[in-house]
Image (spheres, helix red, strand yellow):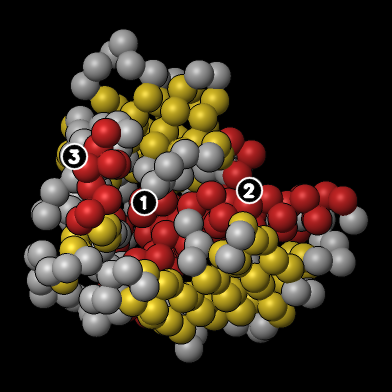
């Protein structure tokens, strides 16, 4: 069976077969942990799903697709919402699923308070390592539809340059036959971070698991109080983030990579761009993606730019 007819190519995007079949997890994955922003405990269960269903969240029987159509702008994380229900901090989990090739998956979410219509994905150590290890442990299998047929996996190829920007920050994508990511960050007030650039020669599952997945989220120590006063990072600690002081440098070394902050931005970008996925396709555009001083809002702006141009043409 082919889903190719469901994908509409345009001047900007061409949907092409990857030469692989859609996959799903081979069994249930369950993880419980503390969350970064609310500080509460939540449980996530990843269930196998039929081919063509894609990735979606199930929170109290409200189904929220992992699609940019349901993304809302929120500080320091990516949030999906529908009918008054919200799933926060989805980026690390989606990054791992996209990179590992989990194309179809039901993501069941549970929180500890039935009165709260919001739940957050656990932060673990601030990276995607816990999810990568869990997926590797349970394994993958070919996803089939209700009739038992497999489906080819499609991928979006960028045909011409496209970009999104805010002030001096940007994300751009240039035509390429393989996925490459180049990312730059600049923290001139924090010398231990400073200006960093990271570039992947070829982004595949092996490169992701070895070079990207273990990179942890980071923050500037002098901004912690302000963030907490804004109701953020209530569950943040030196166990789930690397913290850098403008005057004292890194407070919880050693780093896993000299450029770990920049690599973590790549991790976030992959999770956010995965919101372009449709019907179990690859979400990450096949392109050379160049980003500078980006964040979750700008990343999702880029997905909307891709989606808007595809619909417009």
Dot 1 and dot 3 residues touching (CB under 8 Å): no
Dot 1 and dot 2 residues touching (CB under 8 Å): no
Residue 65, given in percent of the width and then of the height, sits at 55, 37
Q: Residues within 10 Å of mark 1 (few under 14, many from 20)?
A: many
| Residue drawn where x is 54% and y is 25% of the image | 82
| Residue drawn where x is 48% and y is 52% of the image | 296
The residue most toward the top is 115
Q: Sequence order check: which comes first, mark 1 or mark 3?
A: 1
Q: Mark 1 or mark 2: which is in front? A: 1
Residue 16, given in percent of the width and then of the height, sits at 72, 69
| Residue drawn where x is 10% and y is 64% of the image | 251
Height in image: 106 above or below 8? above
- Mark 2 to mark 3 CA distance (whole Å): 34 Å
Q: Quadrant of the C terminus?
A: bottom right
Whether residue 145 can be seen here: no
Q: Sequence order check: which comes first, mark 2 or mark 3?
A: 3
Q: Secondary structure at mark 3?
A: loop
Residue picked out by circle 1: 93
Q: Mark 2 or mark 3: which is in front? A: 3
> Viewer-proximal residue, 170 or 212?
170
Left-right relation of 249 to 209: left
Residue 177, given in percent of the width and then of the height, sits at 66, 83
Q: Tag on residue 235?
A: 3
Residue 288, given in percent of the width and then of the height, sits at 61, 79
Q: Sequence order check: which comes first, mark 1 or mark 2?
A: 1
Residue picked out by circle 2: 279
Dot 2 and dot 3 residues touching (CB under 8 Å): no
Q: Secondary structure at mark 1?
A: helix
Q: Residues within 10 Å of mark 3 (few under 14, many from 20)?
A: some
Q: Secondary structure at mark 2?
A: loop
């Amino acid at each position: 069976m082919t889903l190719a007819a469901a994908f509409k190519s345009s001047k900007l995007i061409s949907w092409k077969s990857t030469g692989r079949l859609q996959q799903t997890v081979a069994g249930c994955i369950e993880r419980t942990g503390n969350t970064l922003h609310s500080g509460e405990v939540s449980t996530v269960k990843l269930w196998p799903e039929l081919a063509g269903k894609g990735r979606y969240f199930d929170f109290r029987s409200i189904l929220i697709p992992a699609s940019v159509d349901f993304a809302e702008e929120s500080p320091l994380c990516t949030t999906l919402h529908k009918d008054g229900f919200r799933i926060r901090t989805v980026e690390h989990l989606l990054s791992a699923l996209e990179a590992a090739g989990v194309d179809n998956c039901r993501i069941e979410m549970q929180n500890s308070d039935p009165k709260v219509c919001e739940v957050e994905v656990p932060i673990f150590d601030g990276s995607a390592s816990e999810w990568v290890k869990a997926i590797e442990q349970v394994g993958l299998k070919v996803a089939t539809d209700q009739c038992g047929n497999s489906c080819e996996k499609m991928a979006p190829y960028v045909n011409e340059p496209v970009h999104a920007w805010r002030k001096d920050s940007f994300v751009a994508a240039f035509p390429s036959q393989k996925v490459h990511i180049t990312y730059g960050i600049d923290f001139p007030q924090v010398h231990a971070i400073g200006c960093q650039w990271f570039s992947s020669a070829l982004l595949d599952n092996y490169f992701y698991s070895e070079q990207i997945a273990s990179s942890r989220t980071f923050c500037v120590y002098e901004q912690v109080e302000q963030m907490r006063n804004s109701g953020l990072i209530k569950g943040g600690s030196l166990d789930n983030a690397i913290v850098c002081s403008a005057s004292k440098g890194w407070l919880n070394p050693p780093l896993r990579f000299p450029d770990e902050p920049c690599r973590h931005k790549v991790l976030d970008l992959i999770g956010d761009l995965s919101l372009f996925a449709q019907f179990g396709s690859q979400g990450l555009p096949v392109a050379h993606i160049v980003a500078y001083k980006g964040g979750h809002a700008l990343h999702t702006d880029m997905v909307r730019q891709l989606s808007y141009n595809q619909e417009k043409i």
